[in-house]
């Protein structure tokens, strides 16, 4: 696949907060005819869609964004404007694209001209549209976390397998070479037997009280709430009506679990890559966490989570550690992080403390060459590009539903452990807590009809 990036992602991350990003001089599409392209519908047109998913996918000649959808008409119209303008400048043709707009993604899924969808919605709207897209035979790029609950993730996994569609989870650290290199070195024993992994992951601060506000005429708030309980509207609890700064829904339990799922799935997925536990999981979890005592935002703040694995490794996660993953073995350690990379300008990352992308107890460890007969992990250059390749080849993408679900489960059971405040034994095969009815009841949530994965037939 030939990739033709036409937007600098770093510049876009900042530009997205104030308007549309700049586009380099137009160039023709080349030999690829429209009939050979993968027609993509974008579901959710907020911060991550505008600064990451749409931009990244449009950098590939194989991809063509043909439709955009959002329950906020202001955002969906801005997305259409951006996509149309981007293609105009890319092709030199003023009317190359007239992107369709939808308020309801279910209407978009009825469009037989659409081959695939990208889902960049709030966390509580991840699994249901992905399940319905699978039923409609659309291939899927799904932002993390995979699901709001363990049960939703199980339902999505079943739907994807039953309908034989390609689903890629947006854990793009797999495309960052330092994470693959670190995992390969660990898997090939360069630091001896792994006994400890330390993951640095920040919490969220408490927020202000928020009074009820009139619902904007451009927002279908009932559909935005979806399967979650009805609550009064307030702007900081949803998303900004102007701009694309970090939205308040990220810090409310109704719509997610905070940073343990927001960034946690990235780091747990990468850690599992190195530990060779991608398709299993921990056998126990226990946690301590602080939660706000007042204010609208109610997800965890400072925390410490401990997971034990059958292979003898123990994983600790806390905001007290440097953001990244530190593998510790009998013969040394390897630390890996994103370095200076951010998906969007409002990512809650301390750049100064996270700018070392790859380090080790001995520099010689990082210079070690992986031999021909040793373990070589899959290498990709871009998460969206790998997804597009797999749509054509029908091979499993690097972050398929099974790996994505298992990584998300680690996040979700960590959140449950924070709430019950005791050690929980976990069966990673059956995906249930052992002899704990209270904790098992938290693997699912009540869903408000007519919304919710429980009401989708697949």
Image (tube, helix red, strand yellow):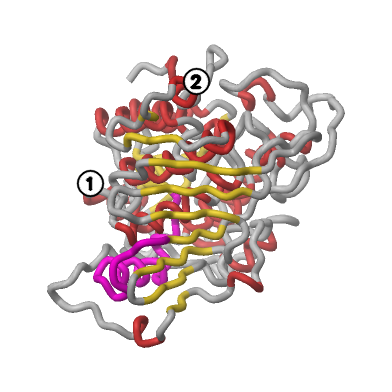
Residue 349 position in % (x across, y down): 64, 61
**Tag 1 residue:** 394
Secondary structure state at the residue bearing disc 2: loop
Seen in the image, is 415 located left or right of residue 278? right
Residue at image coords 51%, 62%? 90
Residue 274 position in % (x across, y down): 34, 61
Seen in the image, is 45 located left or right of residue 67? right
Circle 1 crowding by C-alpha within 10 Å: few under 14, some 14–19, many from 20: some
Residue 188 position in % (x across, y down): 24, 70
Q: Residue furthest top?
A: 449
Secondary structure state at the residue bearing disc 1: loop
Q: Can residue 66 be seen in this view?
A: no
Residue 292 figure quarter: top right
Q: Are marks 2 and 1 in contact (CB under 8 Å)?
A: no
Pointer 2 or 1: first along the chain: 1
Magenta stretch in the rendered image: 170-196
């Amino acid at each position: 696949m030939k990739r033709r990036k036409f937007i600098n992602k770093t510049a876009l991350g900042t530009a997205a907060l104030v308007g549309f990003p700049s586009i380099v001089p137009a160039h023709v599409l080349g030999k690829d005819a429209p009939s050979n392209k993968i027609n993509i519908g974008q579901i959710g047109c907020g911060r991550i869609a505008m600064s990451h998913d749409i931009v990244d996918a449009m950098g590939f000649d194989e991809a063509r964004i043909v439709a955009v959808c959002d329950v906020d008409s202001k955002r969906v119209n801005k997305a259409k404007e951006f996509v149309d303008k981007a293609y105009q400048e890319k092709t030199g043709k003023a009317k190359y694209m007239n992107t369709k707009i939808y308020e309801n993604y279910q209407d978009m899924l009825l469009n037989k001209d659409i081959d695939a969808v990208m889902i960049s919605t709030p966390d509580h709207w991840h699994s249901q549209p992905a399940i319905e897209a699978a039923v409609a035979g659309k291939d899927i790029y799904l932002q993390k976390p995979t699901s709001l609950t363990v049960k939703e993730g199980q339902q999505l996994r079943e739907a994807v397998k039953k309908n034989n569609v390609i689903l890629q989870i947006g854990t793009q650290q797999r495309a960052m070479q330092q994470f693959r290199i670190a995992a390969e070195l660990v898997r090939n024993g360069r630091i001896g037997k792994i006994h400890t992994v330390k993951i640095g992951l920040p919490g969220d601060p408490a927020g202000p009280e928020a009074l009820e506000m009139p619902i904007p005429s451009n927002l279908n708030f009932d559909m935005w709430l979806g399967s979650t309980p009805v609550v009064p509207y307030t702007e900081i609890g949803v998303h900004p009506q102007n701009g694309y700064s970090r939205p308040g829904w990220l810090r409310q339990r109704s719509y997610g679990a905070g940073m343990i799922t927001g960034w946690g799935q990235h780091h747990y997925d990468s850690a599992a890559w190195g530990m060779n536990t991608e398709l299993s999981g921990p056998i126990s979890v226990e946690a301590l966490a602080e939660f706000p005592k007042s204010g609208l935002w109610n997800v965890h703040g400072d925390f410490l989570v401990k997971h034990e694995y059958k292979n003898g490794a123990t994983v600790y996660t806390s905001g007290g550690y440097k953001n990244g993953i530190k593998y510790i073995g009998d013969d040394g350690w390897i630390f890996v992080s994103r370095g200076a990379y951010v998906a969007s300008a409002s990512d809650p990352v301390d750049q100064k403390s996270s700018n070392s992308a790859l380090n080790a107890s001995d520099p010689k460890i990082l210079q070690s060459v992986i031999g021909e007969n040793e373990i070589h992990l899959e290498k990709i250059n871009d998460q969206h590009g790998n997804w597009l390749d797999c749509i054509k080849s029908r091979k499993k993408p690097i972050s398929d539903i099974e790996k994505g679900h298992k990584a998300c489960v680690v996040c979700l059971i960590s959140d449950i452990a924070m709430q019950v405040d005791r050690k929980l034994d976990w069966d990673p095969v059956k995906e249930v807590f052992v002899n704990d009815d209270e904790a098992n009841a938290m693997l699912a949530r009540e869903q408000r009809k007519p919304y919710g994965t429980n009401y989708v037939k697949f």
